[in-house]
Image: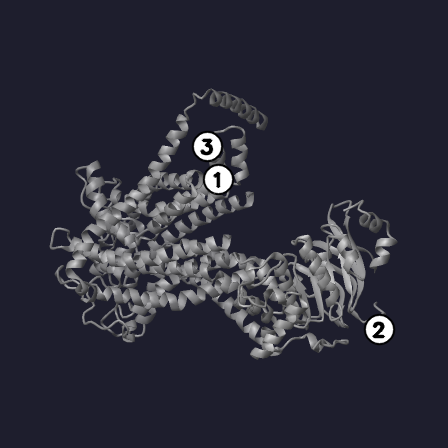
Amino acid sequence: MTIETETEDTDNVNIFEVSDVNVYYGDFRAIRDVSIDIEANEITAFIGPSGCGKTTMLRSFNRMNDLIPTARVTGELKYRGVSLYDKRVDPVEVRRRIGMVFQKPNPFPKSVYDNVAYGPRIAGNVSKGAEMDDLVESSLRKAALWDEVKDRLKSSALGMSGGQQQRLCIARAIATNPDVVLMDEPCSALDPIATGRIEELMAQLKDEYSIVIVTHNMQQAARVSDKTAFFSVEVSEESDLRTGILVEFGSTDLMFSNPTDERTENYVTGRFG
Amino acid sequence: MALSTLNSGAEYAKEKVAADLQGKSFDFAGAVFRLSLLTGLAFGILILGAVMWDVLGDGTGFLFDRGWDFITGNAKSRSDEYGIFEGLRGTFWIGVFVVVFSFPIGIGAAIYLEEYAPDNRVTRFIELNIRNLAGVPSVVYGVLGLAIFVRALDGFYPNSLDKHLGSTTAAAGATLAILVLPIVIITSAEAIRAVPQALREGGFGVGATKWEVIRHHVLPYAAPGIFTGTLLSLARALGEAAPLILVGGVLGSLGPKSSLFELEQLGERFTAMPLMITQLAKKPAFVGDWNSATAAAILVLLVVVIFANLVAILLRNHFEKKRSN
Amino acid sequence: MSQTFGNLEIGDLTGSPARNRRERIVSTTFRITAYVSLLVSILIVLSLVFEAWTFIDGIEIGWLWGDQWAPPFNEYDLKTPLVGSLIVTGIAMLVAIPIGLASAIYLSEYANPTVRKWLKPLLEILAGIPSVVLGFFALRWVTPNIVQNLNADAPGFTLAAAGIGVGILTVPLIASVSEDALAAVPSSLREASAGLGAKRVTTTIRITIPAAISGLVAAFIIGVSRAIGETMVVFLAAGGGGNQAQFTASAFESGTVVTAAMAATTAPSDRLSEGVALQSLYFLGLLLFVITLLLNLIADRFVRKVRMVY
């Protein structure tokens, strides 16, 4: 079905190749027939109204949907050429390569240091004290948090502000040296200043990591992303069931200046959603 | 119907406002209701007070007179020589059985039900079964202990003249461990259910396995709740008498005194604090000072049981307050 | 430092076999612990049914009707323990429902946080008092101070004293289950009522209690189940400690109940040896198990109803 498995040039590697993916929760179909290719070292934004399945799509990239017992994925979802939903694939291994930042900052109730060190520690790659110290420092620096917390690494992460907590969660995600970072509305619980800092951070991180971000905020998508996917809700006429569909996917500039689909245009100009 | 209720409510409100504004309303019905509630509550607390007073009054004097002898002495036939050591020893070993068997099995089952079990009929049946087990009268667990442990062990000595070789400390401990198992499961499951899903997701998100998420995040967060529940169930086990009677506990002296930690006693006849109290309470009140001896024994048991309860309650309140901040 | 990822092979994502094995061992272990509870239930039912059958098989049916429960003499008048249980449970509920319900309503609707903070632990401590202690209390305090005041001819052991003792024991249970039911009523209902100008007593009686009724019924049923299953209070205070009890329908006489009769057959002072008399214990146990199981299942239904509505 998919033909574009080979890459055209080295800069344009596809990290995800999604074709005809449906996600069900029990009998309920949350997203329908989504096909999308996501490139490496770019920021891809998923936008769309509530209930359009953008978060569901994001969470199927690192098999977080497995945590919901009734969730089921059909279709082909490839990560760097390997089918993610192959029976032999271990979700733990997937999540070590594909990190995640959540909507609400969720640091562990541990010290700042232990939050960052947790991922590498369980992965068993880094164990030595000094090596771990370096990794914690570099991760916190990448998350633009080091200067604020370097004197209080041993104090609880729960005492920090919301914005700091979210940057700590980013540091925690990149400490395992992942390939991709998934961000699920990472700024929705933050004030504008904290949001600005996270957006700056994303721009810096994309050199090293591929980022997929779900956002409610169109301006944010326009500011930070290279590509944008617009999801929408389709309401079935006979059953009144709501299903998420992918309407349009392309470069962010084009999506916001010259959308091809009327629904996208309505959404980005604020007439809908 | 709904409409008329609404109307009468509005009417009522209008009258009420008028009355209130004229300042001549005394809420008589409210006062009576409140008073009757308070009376009920006061009864509950008065009873607690009466129990304590009754026991404390009689027991403390006796305990102070007898002192350490009462704790370390054996069950003698005279109230002024009586000691409760054998009962304390049995109760101690019952506690050990509960800690060693009920706690790990109960917490393990709670982890399975909350973290692993698929949402299907089998799981729902197990949960229903556990809730029902928690409601089975304690004396029925005694029947189980008698049928399984005692008679199974009796079978090892078919030619013995003593019919009750199976009535051992081990059988008693195992019976009470089974008795409190459902309580341990239910309270631990509640504590685990209260762990925020975001915490689990954070763990999974950095590539932790299920067991790592449970061990590093779920259990530490749920620990105070689990500890509270296990402590309450331990207190429950230490106070139970009925199942022990069925398992064949001795209401009297065991004979020669062995020390607290000797393992051989697991295979020997047993008694426990609640059994000693039963036996003491059955003695005629007018002979000797048995009434005070009973009260003193109760006092010792209450100190142990209420202390465990109190620690559990305070701990839970402390963490509830801390979490809500 | 940064990992380089080209295209991956399936083997890159299958995870470490050792880690997967460890995960499987852990989850299997937990599953086994959960199944222990099923095993316990099966063993309870099997031992009760099997032995109860042996009992029924070993007696003549006529022995089950007479004027006393006395296993050593092969007299197994069933109505003696059953009516005894009925009397004791009835008295217990007369004591426990008003006190338990009043405490629950006060704690949930009236008490301010400080009062709650002190009262709830007190009720919980009452819940933690071992039943043998309340048995002693019923025998030595309730009997002379309450029962013999109500009826001067009452003997030292009465079903009434046992009933009051069992009632005290049941108060905290009824209070806490009722309070949960009242707390489950959304505060928006109370606010709506108050917004119409209703006084607190009106809101409580007309709105809150009807809304919580399923949970309150569940509390009463659980209370009844607990009272029927209580052993030690009756064993000590009702004279049910012996292996012989005359039938009585009066609360002011000594008697026995199902649980106490069970305990008496194995109580060391007059322990029965193996045989049909001892097996009567299993028969009563099965009776008790079935009754409490039905009550608990019904209560469970009511509790679920509360959860489904709110």
- Real-space CA distance between mark 3 and mark 1, rounded to the nearest whole angstrom: 16 Å
Q: Amino acid at mark 1?
A: Ala
Vertical order, B135 against A101 (above or below): above
Q: Sequence order check: which comes first, mark 3 or mark 1?
A: 3
Mark 3, secondary structure of its residue: helix
Residue placed under numbered mark 3 in the picture: C200
Closer-to-camera residue (B220/B282): B220
Closer-to-camera residue (B145/A244): A244
The subunit carrying tag 3 is C
Residue in the picture at 20% in, 63% down: B252
Q: Amino acid at mark 2?
A: Thr
- Real-space CA distance between mark 2 and mark 3, rounded to the nearest whole angstrom: 73 Å
Which image quadrant for residue B229?
bottom left
Callouts 2 and 3 in the same chain: no
Residue placed under numbered mark 1 in the picture: C212
Q: Nearer the viewer, mark 3 or mark 1?
A: 3
Mark 2, secondary structure of its residue: loop
In the image, taking residue C301 as reference, residue C279 lies left or right, namely left
Residue placed under numbered mark 2 in the picture: A7
